Every structure is written in structure tokens, then in C-alpha cells.
Amino acid sequence: MESLIGPEHPARALWELTGELDLTLYYNEIQAVEGVAGRSSTDPRLLICLWLYAYSRDISSAREVARECEYEPGFQWLCGCQGPSHHVLSDFRSQNGAALDDLFAQTLGMLSAEGLITLECVTQDGTKIRANAGSNTFRRQASLEEHLRQAEELVRRMKEQSQEEEKTSARKQAARERALEERAARLKAAIAEVQKLQKRKKDGKPAQASTTDADAHFMHTTGGGLLPAYNAQLTTDAKHGLIVGLEVVTEANDAAQMGPALQRSLLQHGQYPQQIVADGDYTNHAAVKEAAECGVDFYGSWPPAGESREFDSRGRTAEFQTNAFQYNESADSYRCPAGQTLVLHTIQQAKNGVRYQVYRAGAEVCAACAQRPACAPANAKPAWLRSVSRALEPAVVLEFKAKMATEQARQIYRKRSQIAEFPHAWLKTRGGLRQFRCRGRYKVRLEALWAGLSYNLCRWFAIRRESLAAPTA
């Protein structure tokens, strides 16, 4: 067996490393009762090594791992040519979330102890990973309720039928009942998700949820398509490109993910990072304020002055959008493209804590304006008035914008892509995480953690090889 792989093979390194970790939470799940017959359990240390080695070789399928154990030298050496079944592998990957979190935390602790993680500067970025759900599985609430009624009726009939059949088919009958009950549970989860999404929708259109993965939402993926996916949030340390924080969310937009990322850093490492760099999707008033409250030096991409980041839902042309109105600071008023003056009408408080000054023109001005058809929506009432809002930005936002205008801040921000994008590319290419195998946000998060842990260990082994080769060179 020892001749299957060389002394520097990654499988040996994984086995030696896991021997130094505390796997008590995994072993506590193995229960044995004295005097009662039972079955042997696969060693959790072996299963951990198999999955970490699999993700480092672009393998994310439990069936493929079971097949590789029959002929691939690294897998053969780990399992002694007696690999576990794909059922054991699949169940182990999607269970024991607390144990996997502890394993990830221990690894980060070892990397920090060697000085490979400093948290002096980190990057925050998200990537969309396709869910294990088809686009044709999404249904509205009425359709989901009908499918649920049919599934519950089938379960009832199956149980009645099982009482009449012979005991020889009890095992198959139980498997069928279990499959129907799992389908009914997924449908109930989809109905709950539809109701939650419907409350958020502002356009009044009916919401939809998948019958196979209720947590998956439609998102714009890298290829430009709109597919069911999850948003994987990665926090990467800038020193060696190691992942120091990972979470999977169902929101497609990254605008509200800065605060949770900072809190994960505090929970995981006991401290906030000194600097955090993120792209324009994270850069907003709330993110700047949250970073300032945590004492974190935030670098992000704020749009240039005068550029509107909002989509004009009214369908106005460019000459009548908000950024076409000119502000007069001395008179505290706006001048519209038609030459009319908009004066201060009211001050509103937004959810992000920013106050907005609302400017309007007089009623007789908008009613008699020749440019009204181009400025007003098609269904505008006669009393409609055009308004323009101006943000009264807090001091922290003004300081942030002044900082990002300096050349030093621009140089720091330019390093973002090479640090933040590499882990995404590794997870999807070498880690095989182009599409999740599991369903449900809980299991999907564990799958992402396995891939992220495998990435960190591969980077760790590479750094060790470089440090050993440096004196010789």
C-alpha cells in the first residue's frame, strides 16, 4: 500500500494534518450501546480526507469519489482499497454542520499560528454558483399547494396499501413512503418561501419557488444567464490569498453583505480586519457606516459625482433623468432641462439612515410645461409634479469619498481583483464547484465549506513547498 503514492503526495499531507486536529465533535456522533448488536462505522478522519482530497481534484460527486477509491492511487492509499459507499460519503458531507465549522475554525487557527493569516487587509467578494434545481421546477403558491395536496394523498394511500401487502415488500414500501414524505416536506418549504418572497415584492407579481430546492433564487450568473443559484460570500486575507470567512446567502445583491461579513470575522477570529476592500456592489452608505462603527478601514468603488446608480423605472430618456438636473448650491434649488426651477419641498429619512431633500416645481409649472410628455410617466395624473432628491450624506461618507480620491487609496483598491477573484476561480475550476450537488441552503453551505477548506489546505501545502525550496534556490 505504501508504494502506491510517493512521500510528498497530497493524500499523505492530508492524513498527517487531520491527525493533528481535534475531531471530537465528529466522533461523538458515533454511538455504540453495550450488549446490543450494531454495525461498524467509517472513521470520520478517513471521510474528511476523502472529501478534501476529492475537492482538490475537481471531484464533487459522491458516486465519483466511490469509483475513484477503486483505482486512483491517492484514494486507494487513504481507504486501503476498501472505499466507503457513495451513500456514506454523501450523508457525511451534508451532516454535522457544527463539527465542520469547528474543523474550519481549527484550520484557520493553525494558519494564523504560522503567520499565514494576519487580517491586516482582506477582500470581500461574492460569486454566483448554480443551484441543483431546474428552471422548470419553479411554481406559484396555488400550484405548490395543489402538488402538496396530491403528495399527501399519495402518502395516505401508500400507508393504507402497505397494511395489505406481504411483509416481504416492507422495505420497498418504506422507501416509497419516505420518498413521498420528503417530497411533501420540500413542497411545504417551497410554499413558505413563496409566502416570504411575496411580502418582499413591490410590483405585485406572484412569486415563485422551486419544488426541489426552495432556497434557490434566480440570479444572473457569470455566463450572463438567469438561473437558480446561490450567492457565495468569501472573505480573503491579502497576505497569502487564504479564505478567512465563507457564507452562502440567497440574496443576489451584495449591497447588504458588508455588515454580516465583518461580524463573521469577529466571531471567527475574535477581531475585525484592519482593512477591507470590496467592489462597487458593496459600496453604499450603510456599508461605509458599518465599517466605520467597527473601526475598519474600508476601500470601495463609489460612482463618480453626477452618475446615477438607479434604474429609471419610469422609462425617461437620458435628458430628463435625475442626473440631468443641475443643482444651484447658493440658491439651494435645482434647474430642470426645460429651464424651470425646483425648490426644496420636504426632507425624508431613508432606511439606511441617510436624509434626502426633495425638490419640486410648482403645480402650474409642470402642468403647462411643453416637455411634460418626456418627463412624466405615461399614466401620470393631472396633479403630477416632478421631484428630485438630494442626499445629505453623513460625515463618514464624505470622509470615505475624500479618501478614495487619493492615489494611495486607488493603489490599494487596484489589488482587489487579483486577491478576491482567485479563490472564486479555484473553487469553480479545480474545486469542481460550478454547481452545487446538495439542495437547501444548510447543505449548500456545508458543501461550500468543504471546497473552501480544501482550497486553504492546498494553498497551505503550496506555501510550505515554496518555503522549503527557497533556501535551496
Image: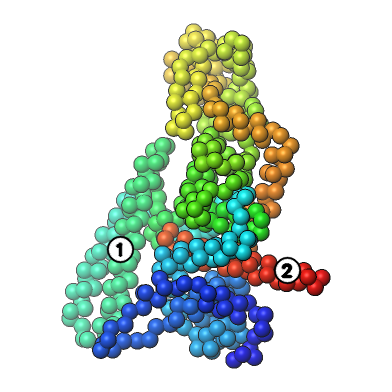
Q: Nearer the viewer, residue 15 or 256?
A: 15
User: To which residue does mark 2 refer?
Assistant: 466
Horizontal and vertical percent position of residue 171: 28, 82
User: To which residue does mark 1 refer?
Assistant: 184
Horizontal and vertical percent position of residue 129: 54, 58
Among numbered discs 2 and 1, the one appearing first in the sequence = 1
Horizontal and vertical percent position of residue 418: 69, 53
Name the image colouring: rainbow
Rendered residue at 63%/60% (across/down)? 115
Q: Nearer the viewer, residue 12 or 473?
A: 473
**For the C terminus, which image quadrant?**
bottom right
Quadrant of res 460: bottom right
Task: Say if residue 232 shows up in the picture.
Answer: no
Of the residues shown, which amino acid type is indicated by label 2? Glu
**For the N terminus, which image quadrant?**
bottom right
Quadrant of res 9: bottom right
Cα distance, mark 2 to mark 1? Answer: 53 Å
Rendered residue at 31%/62% (across/down)? 185
Compared to residue 363, the image places residue 408 above or below, namely: below
Q: Nearer the viewer, residue 202 or 165?
A: 202
Res 451 label:
none
Task: Say if residue 80 shows up in the picture.
Answer: yes
Relative horizontal placement of residue 178, taking residue 316 as reference (left or right): left
Of the residues shown, which amino acid type is indicated by label 1? Ala
Disc 1, SS: helix
Hey, which residue is sitting farthest top in the picture? 364
Compared to residue 467, the image places residue 364 above or below, namely: above
Whether tag 2 and tag 1 are in contact, CB under 8 A, the answer is no
Horizontal and vertical percent position of residue 7: 66, 83
